[in-house]
Image (spheres, rainbow, N blue to C red):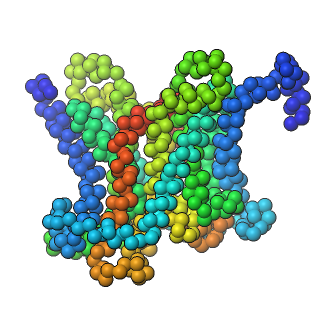
Amino acid sequence: MNLKKMSGFDIGYKVFVYVFCTLFALICLYPMICVLSYSVTPYMEYLEHPLRLIPSHFDFSAYQKLLGFDLVYSGYRNTIFITVVGVLLNIFLMCISAYPLSKKDLKGRNFVLGMITVTMFFNGGMIPNFYLVRTIGLYDTIWSLIIPGVLGAYNLILMKNFMTQIPDSLEESAVIDGANEFVVLFRIIIPLSKPAIATFIIFHAVAQWNGYFNAILYTVKRSLWPLMLVLREMVVEDGMNMVNQGQISDSSLTTIFTMKMAIIIIAVLPIICIYPFLQQYFTKGLMVGSVKG
Amino acid sequence: MTKKTTAAAAAGKPAGNGLPSWLAYIARKKYLYIMLIPCVVYFFIFNYIPMYGVLIAFKDFNFKLGILGSPWIGFENFEYMFGLSDFYEVLRNSIVLSVLRMIFTFPFPIILALLMNDIAIPKYQKTVQTIIYLPHFVSWVVIGGILVNFLSPTNGAVNNIIKSMGGEPIFFLGDPKYFRTLVVLTSIWKDSGWGTIIYLAAITSIPAELYEASTMDGANKLQNLWYVTLPSIKSTVVIMFILQMGRIMSNGFEQVYILQNTRNLSVSDVFETYTYRVGMVGGRYSFATTVGLFTSVVSIIFLLASNKLANALGEEGIW
């Protein structure tokens, strides 16, 4: 940096930029680090030194105790299922829908696009959706957490815009060879759309993993609860419920706090672990829609 | 349909295989149309049938009778709604929260993006980006869980610190006066970093020559920001703001519901949570649909009006 040529104001501004951005990044990270630290700190030590981030000795008993909860297992299983199946369905439907919609000369395309766009601005609302889910028999099944919302107008249009940008010339050689559109889509278009697909995989996976609204609305059976509903009951609602139900054999209530911290870590860990690997895609992929198509 | 078929057949030249031209067109593009079927069926069932379902608002809805079988009651629910003091409280809460978000949450990612763009060390910029996107991937349940436990008046870390300094513990989540602050702060924490992506992209697409020229003319950092950067990202900001206006009635169920409790209900009850409580918990389906329809209509009016306003001010808007 050429500090000599900079005025005093510019230097002050530079310092402010670095301090502000660093501080905000630390604030983003700090709560999660606290949770991680508290989950392995003996409770009595936490009470004495709430600000200490590295415990005098690591205590993994909270994680061990969590292994005794059936609800944690079923929650994890359900969440993994709705995330994996939801993402597969979402990406498959997005690809086969976006491709024909990216053909500008296809008759009826504008009608379908219009029909999709309207849903971005108007929807029936909570009760009509609930009534629909009940009527078609999805209510209180795992599919009620997958099918409603599997295809969203906004992301579909972004995907369509991305495919529109792929030059037609890339398809032409295949068409001349007599390949039909399915072959062109799967052999040529989808491989070229990898950055966009990676982005939408992240979007949908995060939504499926983190959301709890559909589960509150559409499920009754606790065995269907995704991890986030289990987490909500154990961590946000009173953790005492678990004690009353006799699920904690250990009589010391004080460990509940540590267990809450541990289950938060268990719930966010998969997302945090895959995130850095996918980050390179979504910064680029999110821009796919910025060109109007 | 038959009329249309014959008209089309009469108008179009018969194709080589004897089919009317429009049918031949569909036959030629059949794979593309087959691909579109799931999408059209999906949007029809999961978006258009619920739109038809808003008729519930005008009926004395009964699950056994269905939408068609339930008796009409006209605008009775709307009259009831507008006469209800609860409704005005919920309306006030929803709009106050939305306006607070527009004032505090909305500009934050823009400022953050502008500052981040001036980090001259690429590695450092990348690290900051990686970290500030992270909260977007954290569920509201987790954020709620952290707040409930860290802010707990009995043994939460924050109150332990307050107590150790001789202060009285504060029940942040139970006291209505802290609710709105918590909503705004958690929104900033969760999504500001993520929100910078779109603005950073707009900023990096500004040609470097513009800055060179203005620096040559003696502009300092702040003048560059004001005369070059801001005008260049204005259209992105306007579009984001119009979309934000379209969300004036919505505050997101998941965030508000997780921070809500009986003590702060007087300020925390917004349309989403109210509809849920009245409709799903209370079983008053017709009335809850009425409230939902009201919010949808108001949202669209706000969206269209702000888009119109943007157009009138010479901006492109969303269409």
Q: Is residue A180 or residue A241 the one in the foreground?
A: A180
Residue A125 drawn above or below residue B268: above
Q: Is residue A50 left or right of residue B315?
A: left
Out of A188 and A282, give the one closest to the viewer.
A188
Which quadrant of the structure image shows residue B11?
A: top right
Residue A11: x and y in percent read: 14, 33
**Can residue B91 be seen in the rendering of this structure?**
no
Residue A283 vertical placement versus B151 (above, below): above
Is residue A137 shown left or right of residue A169? Answer: right
Q: Is residue B62 left or right of residue A242?
A: right
Q: Quadrant of the N terminus of chain A?
A: top left
Closer-to-camera residue (B76/A274): A274
Q: Is residue B210 visible?
A: yes
Q: Residue furthest left?
A: A4
User: Could you tell me which residue is drawn at 60 percent across and 20 percent down?
Assistant: A174
Q: Position of residue B312 (x, y in %)?
A: 52, 33
Residue under the point 60% across and 65% down: A140
Q: Quadrant of residue B178?
A: bottom left
Residue drawn where x is 28% and y is 37% of the image: B126
Q: Position of residue B299 (x, y in %)?
A: 56, 50
- What percent of the width, then of the height, locates residue A81? 51, 55
How many marks are shown on the rendered structure? Answer: 0
Query: Quadrant of the image for the C terminus of chain A?
Result: top right
Question: Toward which corner of the image does residue B1 lie, by quadrant?
Answer: top right
| A1 lies above or below B144 | above
Residue at the spot x=11%, y=28% of the render?
Answer: A3
